[in-house]
Image: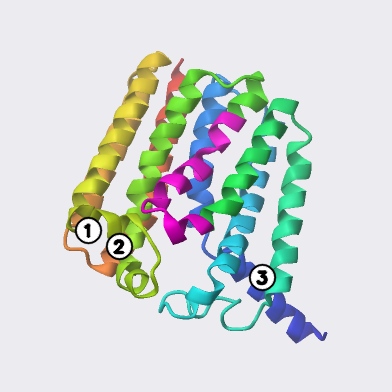
Amino acid sequence: MNIADLTKKIDAYERLMRLDKPIGILLLLWPTLWALLIAGNGQPDWIIVIIFVTGTVLMRSAGCVMNDIADSQYDGLVERTQHRPIPNGEVSKKEAYVLAATLSLVAFGLVNLLNMLTVKLSVLALFLAITYPLTKRFFVMPQAYLGVAFGFGIPMAFAAISNNVPPVAWLLLIANVFWAIAYDTEYAMVDREDDLKIGIRSSAITFGRFDVLAVMLCYAITLALLALAGYWLLMGVAYYLGLAVAAGMAFYHYVLIKNRARANCFQAFLGNNWLGLAIFAGLAAHYLIN
């Protein structure tokens, strides 16, 4: 293989792992960072933070590869996904399987540097990552399953730092499930017509004409649960200011999605990175002040 071919192959792998579109990594990372900050009382061990950030990138990349393997027969039929590396022949399924396995093994190797409880939870996290793509075939709300998969870094973070998973960790995980339903419904609204044609299930299809209302209700529940967590943890004003900023962003998303224009729905989806950052900033400010 010459340099030009190698460069093309690396580029195809990069796009298969979605490293050129980091929004998924960020949406997976923010809840994990919230948990690390809380579990570490504002000062988590930086070695653990580095392990989790690296592991998040690796497992998100592996998850994208697994998703594209599962969706390979459908992606070529959808306008937005027809040029992905597997349907257009740049990467074979065999190569994709090897890549997903390699990424997962490296991530598991990192987790093994932590305590046994975290290792045990990582096995369940891997199961969630592998099975999520399949839920789109039979589950009317795969976005809820995605929320559990994307939020499982929360109990793992508490386990890694304190060697236990307190009730507040599960409350944060539930909040993340509703957040994922909100942002991934915005994403699914972009693909609704294509999904209906090929028989893929999504929350946007399930909610139907109540999709916008459902998104906003999920945002409201997310913020209410995070406020409850803050009350439980005796958070100060800075944390609630972060939630207020996040609430303002959620309302802006309503402005974007109310007419269901594809471009605006996708813009709202991307904007959830800033919503997650606002919550993290509120947490960080609380611990800096206190």
Q: What's the distance in space between the residues labelled 1 and 3, CA to CA?
A: 35 Å
Q: Which residue carries the number 3 mark? A: 13
Helix, strand or loop for disc 2: helix
The residue lying toward the viewer, choosing from 46 and 71, is 71
The residue lying toward the viewer, choosing from 148 and 240, is 148
Kindly identify the amino acid type of the residue bearing the numbered disc 3. Tyr
Which badge, 2 or 1, is on the more N-terminal residue? 2
Residue 31 appears at what percent x and percent y? 49, 37
Q: What's the distance in space between the residues labelled 2 and 1, CA to CA?
A: 10 Å
Kindly identify the amino acid type of the residue bearing the numbered disc 2. Met
Is any atom of residue 249 visible in this view? yes
Kindly identify the amino acid type of the residue bearing the numbered disc 1. Gly
Q: Quadrant of residue 245?
A: top left
In the image, 204: left or right of 176? Answer: left
Give, as a single range, the part of the protein colored magenta.
134-156
**Residue at 72 percent of width and 55 percent of height:** 103
Q: Which residue carries the number 1 mark? A: 208
Residue 172, numbered label: none
Q: Which residue carries the number 2 mark? A: 189
Residue 170 appears at what percent x and percent y? 48, 27
